[in-house]
């Protein structure tokens, strides 16, 4: 139990981004947590892996909060979109919808899935507005045939501009680095298509 508390405390300190000038942060020990067949898993390895998995969640949370503010005029349409989507899925899955969501997505509940649908809807609307502004075109001119090419050209730029508009800055250098790597992964995805 004591080891679990030490691990959780260390994890919380590292993930909260404490700085030496703010408070004294103990350096995580290279304590071996598990040994098996000559292999070892250290506390530092667990903390590093947890930090790597937390950033995409943090990024999506920040993006979601900003989009809800930026696209507040579209929230009602987003709710309608969610309702239609869930009704359509319920027609197919019936009472097994939540289980289907758990098995086929990374979401653990209908509510979590609905939140993701809302953020995706708002993001799509935001990016399309961004494209219209940059290309000087009407919304209706973005079609199924050309959406991907526009996204390839403007998706990352739109996110960077949105984060800049809301003065998003990562105080922790590791998170700043992860942000740049995450953006690069998105750019690479679109460039490989």
Image: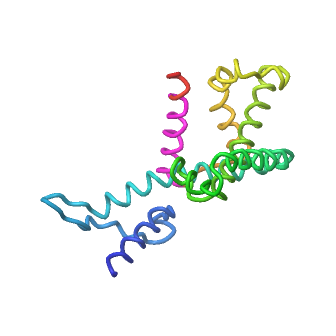
Identify the image quadrant of residue 38. Answer: bottom left
Count of marks overlaid on the render: 0
At x 62%, y 24%, the residue is 152
Left or right side of 3 for 103: right
In percent of width and height, residue 183 lies at 55, 37
- Here the colouring is rainbow
Identify the image quadrant of residue 34. Answer: bottom left
In percent of width and height, residue 173 lies at 49, 50
Name of the residue lying farthest toward the bottom: 2
Verify whether residue 182 appears in magenta.
yes
Left or right side of 58 for 23: left
Verify whether residue 122 appears in magenta.
no
At x 51%, y 64%, the residue is 16
Q: Main secondary structure of the magenta part?
A: helix
Nearest to the observer: residue 39 or residue 91: 91
In percent of width and height, residue 91 lies at 70, 47
Check the image and report above or below for 111 versus 131. below
Location of the N terminus (image quadrant): bottom left
Nearest to the observer: residue 24 or residue 79: 79
Magenta-drawn segment? 172-188
At x 75%, y 26%, the residue is 131
Check the image and report above or below for 185 versus 109. above
């Amino acid at each position: 139990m004591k080891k679990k508390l030490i691990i959780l405390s260390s994890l919380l300190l590292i993930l909260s981004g404490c700085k030496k000038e703010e408070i004294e942060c103990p350096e995580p020990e290279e304590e071996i947590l598990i040994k098996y067949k000559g292999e070892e898993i250290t506390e530092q390895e667990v903390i590093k892996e947890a930090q790597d998995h937390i950033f995409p969640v943090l990024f999506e949370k920040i993006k979601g909060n900003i989009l809800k503010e930026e696209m507040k005029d579209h929230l009602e349409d987003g709710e309608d979109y969610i309702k239609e989507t869930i009704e359509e899925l319920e027609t197919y899955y019936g009472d097994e919808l939540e289980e289907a969501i758990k098995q086929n997505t990374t979401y653990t509940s209908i509510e979590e899935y609905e939140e993701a649908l809302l953020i995706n809807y708002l993001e799509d609307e935001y990016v399309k507005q961004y494209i219209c502004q940059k290309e000087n075109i009407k919304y209706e001119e973005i079609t199924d045939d050309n959406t991907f090419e526009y996204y390839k050209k403007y998706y990352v730029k739109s996110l960077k501009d949105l984060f800049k508009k809301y003065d998003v800055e990562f105080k922790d250098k590791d998170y700043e680095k992860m942000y740049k790597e995450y953006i690069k992964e998105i750019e690479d995805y679109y460039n490989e298509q």
